[in-house]
Amino acid sequence: MDLILEGIKKAFWLLITFDPEVMGITLLSLEVSGIATLISLLIGISAGVAVALSRFIGKRMVVSFINTGMGLPPVVVGLFVTLFLWRNGPLGFLGILYTPAAMVIAQTIIATPIVMGITLAAIQQLPQKLRLQILALGATRLQMVWILIKEAKLPLLAAVMAGFGGVISEVGASIMVGGNIKGYSRVLTTATVLETSRGNFDVAIALGIILLLLAYFVNLFLTQIQQRERPR
Amino acid sequence: MGEQTPILEIRNLEVNRGGAILLQVPSLSIQEGEIFSLIGPNGAGKTTLLQTLSHLLRPFQGELFFRGNRVETNHSVLGYRRKLAMVFQEPLLFDTTVLNNVASGLKIRGMKRDEIHDRAMEQLERFGIGHLNGRSAKTLSGGEAQRTSLARAFALRPEILLLDEPFSSLDPPTRDSLMEDLEHILQQTRTTTIFATHDRLEALRLSDRIAVMNNGTILQIGSPEEVTNHPVNELVASFMGVEAILTGKVIKRNGGTFIASVEGQEIEAVGDVPLGETVVLCIRPENVTLSIRSTREGTSARNVFPGKILKVISLGLYQKVQLDCGFPLVAYVTNHSLEELSLVEGKDVRASFKATAVMVMRKGE
């Protein structure tokens, strides 16, 4: 029990004093996951809308594929990104293995199907004739897509939350492609794994608390928006 | 009426999907300022035609002309669509306030903000929902929502208004109230309107001309009086509420009238039909009079038949009486008459109708 209590005490100390290493790890986490989420939103929302609104042969298969992608195991993503970025791999010339850039790539690959899948469902559950009504009001196709996205803003906010939540807390891919290098590619999740294995519970607990708080506050913020927009 | 370019014209329109022909309209012209209804049962092609006219349903074969100019694919389609406004059976409002909904079409067209506000409020007042402008669209009743949808369409000051069964999902009192308001507004604005409905009474009430559709084709176009009293075939007749459709053979001719033998009875009608020809006779229930006298006295009608009441069906404000006069016949009577004459099932009555009330169609039309 002493172990745990000591750990918690020291963790608070690290947090209150804004320990530089802990802060650095936190900021990197936010940066990497933030960028990955943003890119996944760009790709995921546009692709999700495009698939939802188009009619083509094999659409059902594509939708299944996307839904499967939502449950993609991060370590598998990590494996494939590593293979591609490996020195002799197809993209080895980029030399970005074991860098934050590689982590952004891996996390984007994890988050994109999640965003795409939720967007697809969100657009498909809008009334079928709404598209026609918008076009009948004289909208261009682009205006129509924009209006549909606005109409689906509640589930799309859920997509943002799901996307960010999925990547801020993942560890497998981040360790594999990032290398967990101190002061460089070490993020909250990967650092927690390391410190726990070393028995540095104070640091591990501090990082764990931050991770929890981060996840909580980001979701609180997004939930507030979602609930505020909710039909009265 | 002089030679006026129709506001909308269709030539050789055809819509095929998966090998099936959904719509086939060789030609159709809509005049500016008229209210033109498309009526027909579900699946007749009314919605398909409306959506094709607004260039929402593609691809289609054929040509569309707006004020004499051909509407081409890609270029002027957006321009053409911006001259129209369409209201559907469901209100299809956006998740925002009533005012923003009514303004949405104007925003899409890039109008200036204050102009948008004024125009939107003008339409809200016109439809009697000005007081709802700040309310969320999700909290509206069915009637209020449909008024909002109509206000949104009128705010665009469309050159053609397309209505796809806009009253179908409303309850009767709401429907009547909204129809009355819409009728009034259409009279004021003289907006060319194309209106699809499966309710012939709605069409009869609002329209200048009616097109009766079935199975993707237009069976007849005419004024309400024409399609009601001069249906071109049995389908149109039955859709327009003719309850008695009888087949007979012409056995006598006398100037402008003839007598046809229908199931052993002789019915006189007006028309120039050769002897021996098979005809289809339609008698509207409103034109059949019932009495309990057994003789011909007291009626100037040529067609007088004794009959027995098979069934009396209440239609609320009046009664539908199904008779067997040797041939099936249907009459409408008021509740008062029903009581006065003690009309009950099994009772013997005398049914009469004028020769001029018999609508004649040649068999095979």
Image: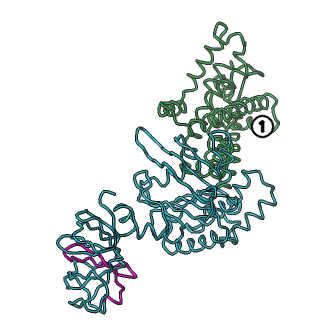
Chain colours: A green, B cyan
The quarter holding residue B364 reads: bottom left
Q: Nearer the viewer, residue B321 or B249?
A: B249
Q: Measured from the top left, where is residue A189 in percent x and y?
A: 66, 29
Residue A155 seen anywhere in this rendered image of the structure = yes
Q: Nearer the viewer, residue A166 or A115?
A: A115
Residue at the spot x=72%, y=12% of the render?
Answer: A95
* Callout 1 amino acid: Leu
In the rendered structure, which segment of residues is drawn in magenta? B313-338
State left or right for residue A89 relative to residue B11. Answer: right
Residue B327 within the magenta-colored segment of the rendering: yes
State left or right for residue B363 relative to residue A119. Answer: left
Chain assignment, label 1: A
The quarter holding residue A74 reads: top right
Q: Residues within 10 Å of mark 1 (few under 14, many from 20)?
A: some
Residue at the extreme left:
B264
Residue at the spot x=69%, y=15% of the render?
Answer: A97
Q: Measured from the top left, where is residue B2 in percent x and y?
A: 63, 62
User: Which SS type dominates the magenta stretch?
Assistant: strand
Label 1 sits on residue: A15
The quarter holding residue A24 reads: top right
Q: Secondary structure at mark 1?
A: helix
Q: Measured from the top left, where is residue A170 in percent x and y?
A: 62, 30
Count of numbered circles in the view = 1
Residue B213 within the magenta-colored segment of the rendering: no
State left or right for residue B257 relative to residue B28. Answer: left
| Rendered view: B29 above or below A122 | below
